[in-house]
Image (cartoon, grey):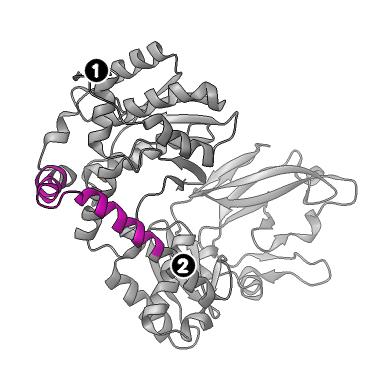
């Protein structure tokens, strides 16, 4: 544990209070990401002083990554601190993936945000400060990031974790590390020291101790200048997003018209693709890969299929449109349904919602063997009682369902009869009559 001498404190309550006044309302729930380090301890201390006046409900979350031999001591420290300050604390122990392509630091961050996503709150409050902005800018520039990657973190932001959207507050972003240290000394605060912060083998530590420290010694105020540059990059990114929206002809949708891409030069075309992917919350490919995606999307003749895997999604060209579809993963051979509200299916879920007068007739499923199964080929369905049964292939083509979406799609069967197909509908003989109890079935991707 560490503590320090007293010295005149900066007015952090005023700085943090401004951010709270702009973003929060009385009654909002704030959860502080509490590592036990100096930044998060100072943030929690300031928020404790403001919570009553602002009418805020304050709590904290500590994520134990299990990477340090001191992890248990840090957890105990956070429990004691929150007990002393009367702040409810949630502790989450996570397993960090090792050996991933993007390194241990990135894997720990992913695990941390997955833990954050499980907390019910209006705001997740994080203790990033001005030096973090400068370090992040240098780190991303050295990785070859573009304007978006070099943009500053925002004091008020949103992060997506799976289907959950987290609203983020970073009230200390304008505060340099030295002011946080002065405040901690003046208040007699105690905190934990992460021994890995001194390890120059970690890229961020090398930038902090070797590069940024020398820059600040040679150019006083270098951290502030870098933080301002990051803000300018953020403004430039916003302008590029506005340009992409104009090129698209309006706000982002699930699909992007190929014609919109064809009329643009290469730089604006790549910017439009970048904007589309960002709007779908997908990582942006490297500049070289994005250029290749752009080239092949435009060069393909006719309606030849073009598909690019992007994590759990596939970017493809189909019938004059560019769209994303989930990648097909392993599916069960057969998954019985016994009245559950939902069943897992690959990267998604199939939901069953009780209805009246719409959906699948409940009486026709009652007492029979009902199950989900993937498409095998050759299936036929009669969704329109005025027309004969037709092959799923023809129905998919008529409905414009892209081939990747058809693969691994859950089909609902009753005995040996096909009952329901996503994007197509319900077999005529199983459709619910007026005033009859039924089931509405939906396939959702997560």
Q: Secondary structure at mark 2?
A: helix
Is the residue marked by circle 2 packed among few (<14), some (14-19), or many (20+) residues within 10 Å?
many
Query: At x 38% / y 36%, what residue is drawn?
Result: 126
Magenta stretch, overall SS? helix
Magenta-tinted stretch: 206-235
The part of the image, by quadrant, that contains residue 297 is bottom left
Q: Position of residue 355 (x, y in %)?
A: 79, 44
Q: Which mark is residue 73?
A: 1
Q: Is residue 111 above or below residue 75?
A: below
Query: Residue 172 bears which disc, if any?
Result: none
Q: Looking at the picture, how far across and down is residue 302, in whole percent?
A: 49, 88
Q: Quadrant of residue 273?
A: bottom left
Write down the residue under mark 2: 241
Left or right, 391 with reference to 237: right
Q: Where in the figure is residue 223, as x and y percent of width and height?
A: 22, 48
Q: Is residue 195 left or right of residue 303?
A: left
Q: In this rendering, does residue 308 appear at all?
A: yes
Please report the residue visible at 65 percent of the width from the left and 38 percent of the height from the top: 341
| Residue in the foreground of this view, choosing between 414 and 66 | 66
């Amino acid at each position: 544990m560490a503590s320090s001498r007293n010295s005149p404190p900066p007015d952090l309550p005023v700085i943090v209070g401004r951010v709270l006044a702009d973003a929060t309302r009385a009654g909002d729930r704030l959860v502080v990401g509490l590592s036990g380090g100096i930044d998060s301890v100072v943030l929690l201390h300031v928020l404790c002083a403001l919570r009553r006046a602002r009418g805020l409900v304050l709590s904290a979350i500590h994520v134990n990554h299990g990477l340090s031999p001191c992890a248990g001591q840090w957890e105990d420290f956070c429990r004691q601190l929150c007990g002393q300050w009367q702040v409810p604390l949630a502790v989450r122990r996570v397993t960090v993936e090792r050996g991933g392509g993007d390194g241990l630091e990135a894997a720990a961050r992913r695990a941390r945000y997955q833990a954050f996503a499980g907390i019910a709150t209006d705001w997740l409050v994080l203790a990033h400060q001005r030096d973090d902005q400068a370090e992040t800018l240098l780190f991303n520039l050295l990785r070859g990031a573009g304007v978006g990657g070099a943009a500053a973190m925002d004091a008020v932001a949103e992060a997506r974790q799976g289907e959950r959207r987290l609203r983020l507050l970073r009230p200390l972003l304008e505060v340099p590390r030295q002011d946080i240290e002065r405040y901690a000394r003046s208040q007699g605060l105690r905190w934990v020291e992460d021994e890995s912060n001194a390890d120059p083998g970690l890229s961020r530590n090398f930038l902090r101790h070797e590069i940024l420290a020398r820059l600040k010694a040679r150019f006083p105020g270098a951290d502030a200048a870098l933080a301002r540059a990051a803000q300018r990059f953020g403004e430039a990114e916003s302008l590029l997003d506005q340009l992409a929206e104009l090129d698209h002809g309006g706000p982002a949708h699930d699909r992007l018209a190929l014609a919109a891409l064809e009329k643009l030069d290469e730089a604006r075309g790549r910017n439009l693709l970048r904007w589309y992917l960002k709007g779908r919350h997908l990582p942006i490919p490297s500049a070289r890969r994005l250029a290749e995606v752009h080239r092949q999307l435009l060069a393909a003749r006719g309606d030849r299929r073009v598909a690019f895997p992007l994590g759990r999604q596939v970017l493809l060209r189909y019938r004059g449109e560019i769209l994303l579809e989930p990648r097909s993963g392993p599916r069960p051979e057969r998954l019985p349904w016994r009245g559950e509200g939902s069943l897992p299916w690959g990267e998604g879920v199939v939901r069953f919602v009780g209805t009246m007068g719409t959906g699948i007739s409940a009486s026709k499923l009652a007492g029979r063997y009902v199950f989900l199964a993937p498409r095998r080929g050759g299936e036929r369905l009669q969704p329109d009682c005025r027309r004969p049964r037709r092959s799923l292939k023809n129905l998919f083509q008529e409905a414009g369902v892209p081939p990747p979406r058809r693969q691994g799609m859950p089909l609902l069967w009753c005995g040996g009869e096909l009952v329901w197909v996503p994007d197509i509908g319900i077999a005529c003989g199983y459709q619910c009559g007026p005033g009859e109890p039924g089931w509405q079935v939906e396939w959702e991707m997560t």
